[in-house]
Image (tube, helix red, strand yellow):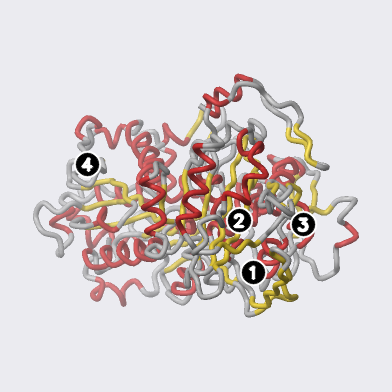
Amino acid sequence: MLVNKDLIKNKIKDLSVFERGELIWDMNKEFYDEKPVSIETFYTDTRFFGNSFVSKTKGLTIFPFWQEVLKDLYPHPMVRKYDEIIVEAPIGSGKSFGSVLSLMYELYRNNCIHDPLEYYPNLGHGTMIVFIFFSLNLQTANINWQYAKDWLSSSPYFKEFWTPSKAKQLPDGTTPINLDKGLYINIGSQMQHGISRAIHSFILDESNFYKIKGQDKENYDSLSTRLVSRFPNKDGVQWIVSSAESDGCFMDDVKNTSKDIKRSWIIPCPPQWIIKGRDNFSSDEFQVFPGDIMRDAFIVDELTKKDVTNDMNLINIPIDFLDIFKKRLIRSLKDLANVRTANAAKFFKSKEKLNLMQTIPNRVTDPVSKLAYEVIFLDEKDERDTLIQYLEPHIEYFKNPMNKHALRFCHMDIGRTKDKLSFSISYAVYTDEEFYRTPSAININSERFYYTDLTVTVKAKPNQQIPYYKIHNAFVWLRDICGYDIEIITTDQREGGAKLRQDLNISGFKVDYLSVDRTKTAYEIAYEIVQEDKCIIPKNKLLFMELSDILDTGDKIDHGTNFSEAYKYSFKGQQYEQKEASKDVADGWVGSIYLANQAQKIADFNKIITQQNNVNLGDRTISNFADNYMKNYYS
């Protein structure tokens, strides 16, 4: 909040931070109702936020790490060292508290000004000066808004300027907090939520996890531009906050752009147990190799210690976290250890993991020879040549499938030349009652295990195209004859798949467009599931080869030029060979797993009649759950 910068620049050059702050105050105090207090006083004094952050039994509840960050950021009430703060920190580390507290301090410093609209020369009468929390959606942004609301409600100071009942919903669906001096706290998730507002300061939260490609950068650019256009002296602050993700994510772009900017601060954050205080955890530790561009991550134990080499950088982790790391290693490395997963030439580096999950028989079978097929050819002109005939040998399974209560999710990859089509049908079941915070929202989410019922690849006969109506008829047969319901069917190829989606929709199926190519999210979710042994799929060599050879280019997941070895297969006595690499089957499978992962509801409670006890699949055992658990999580 500096004015007359050119005038005072030379005067403050050789002053200490305290002297500089006092000089700025002396030159601007006529604009203020009162002098702002220090950041420490702001969060400890009961006049401000002391009621929220100081406990009679626990003392100050802000982690020491963030106390130091805020002290460094605000060395004096009239001085802020940085305009942009970039934080990639573990979950549960207090990054949201730290960034929201900073914005509330900016709000407070502006509220100390007698007339903020008069103070800032670029603002017209009636302008909304906004301190905004941006996130993936309004629901997640509302979490930070609720923090701010609770803190303000417990502050005698802010109660003088704000009445909670005055909050009214705006036309865009957001509900701002409005202080009497025209200062607003609001939330947003898209560019329109910042239109026609003078954005003074903002938080862009969970910026690594936007599902729509480019929305993260779009929001960042829009917010930054609006801040500078209304406050050209950079009076406000912008926080870019997220949990860790893979290399090449949005935060990398921000860091690369900002690393040489003097007033941008990239905060290096340690693991959660360091931020919370190492003394709060057991002194006993276990070790983890976080992986690199050629090797998968693993926990070092009696079985794996033989794989440790001198060039591996191992992480020491308190034994308190051993169970969670065993259950979800990759996610825990990101969320708790704040360790990036490396992008590699090969995305799925462990063929052993991929092979392990293929334990279910293939359910595409020739009705005459009884041979199982991974690829089938359908004749566009022969009405008798249908997809249904290859599914009929398994009609009893489709009538009474395993985990019948589970909702099925189907994704279809359609070849651009319309001569190839692959789809998979998958579902998820809950395996225990442990709650977990997902990267896209702070909520409870029980552990899931994934199954794939069916993986189908259809090719057209030479000089023909895929007969889409035969695919459509197969889905109708599954539903109407077998009673095998599919919750949703998605396809890629927005235009190319439109006719098939339309026909399926007319027949009563819920359909949508989904591309697993636009971002790496779907593949990264599938990678974690494979890495943590949480999936069982049909035996399918083509799927195995595609997943084994898939490349991470940094920007996207893609296939190479040729398979490392040719894929050989037969159909009705004819031998075929495919040398060119592909990922059609992989895209279909990954899409179906992604749908099952993202779904809020994964089962139909009405179908839960009896419980299966200890379903054995090879060396895997998935135990069933009590009736009460079913009612809580499936309804």
Number of the front mark, 2 or 4: 2
Q: How many marks?
A: 4
Please name whichever residue, 432 or 146, is drawn nearer the observer in this view of the structure.
432
Residue 623 higher or lower than 509, as above or below: above
Cβ atoms under marks 2 and 4 closer than 8 Å: no
> Gap in Å between the C-alphas at discs 4 and 3?
58 Å
Secondary structure of residue under mark 2: strand
* 157 sits to left or right of 242: left
Residue position marked by numbered label 4 in the rendering? 178
Q: Are marks 2 and 1 in contact (CB under 8 Å)?
A: no
The N terminus appears in which quarter of the rendering? bottom left
| Among the two numbered marks 4 and 3 on one chain, the one whose residue lies closer to the N terminus | 4
Q: Secondary structure at mark 4?
A: strand
Q: Which residue is mark 1?
A: 550
Q: Which residue is mark 2?
A: 456
The residues tagged by marks 3 and 2 sit, at their Cα atoms, a distance apart of 18 Å
User: Mark 1 or mark 4: which is in front?
Assistant: 1
